[in-house]
Amino acid sequence: MSYESTSCTVICEKLKEFSPKATEADQTSFITQLVKAIGAKKVLEVGTFAGTTALSIALVLPEDGQMVTIDFKEDWVASGQPIWEKAGVSHKIKSIVKDAVQALDELIANGETGTFDLVYIDADKWNYPVYYDKCMELVRKGGLILLDDTLWEGYVCDPNINKDGRTIGR
């Protein structure tokens, strides 16, 4: 695959047509660079939304790589599937449609402990501590856990924002 076809800027700009809330190009570029830098073969994403980050990661995974996504909204996951198919990476992506805590518990119960190279958490922010604890069991020793929106455009440092909105950052 050429650089031009996997450039996160190109991918993200095209994906903005499908989802204006898609992860920004600089974030996606950073995530995919980390995936490549650690030689990740198995990645977990908690919070699929429109599937744009899953697509970007799947594009840089090796051919035998696996991207597991979790989201509770069937229609959000379904909106990403045609994009994954068109990009030729749908065989790398497994979607789990259910409550994330339940899905993570099932992954742990099914022997997936310590098998993920990288975990990306981008779901309901109030459950981040629970997701993080469960993902600590799922990520391999030396693997990475990335948490989206932890700085939330600097709002976590603004004392004028209510405490609930700053919980993750503090």
Image: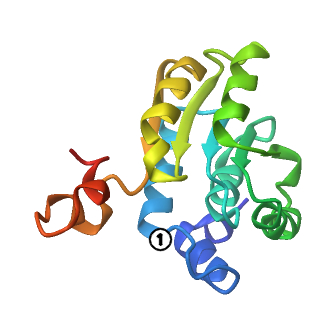
In-front residue for pair 60/143? 143
Residue at (38% x, 57% y) in the render? 149
How far from the left and from the top, in percent, is residue 103? 73, 34
Residue 35 is left or right of residue 42, and the answer is left
In-front residue for pair 3/50? 50
In-front residue for pair 7/15? 15
Classify 10 Å Cα crowding around label 1: few (below 14), some (14-19), many (20 and above).
some
How far from the left and from the top, in percent, is residue 130? 49, 32
Residue at (71% x, 45% y) in the render? 70
The N terminus, quarter of image: bottom right
Residue 147 is left or right of residue 67, and the answer is left
Above or below, 4 relative to 36: below
- Read off the residue under disc 1: 24
* Amino acid beneath label 1: Glu
Residue 102 found in image quarter: top right
How far from the left and from the top, in percent, is residue 60? 65, 50
Q: What element carries label 1?
A: loop
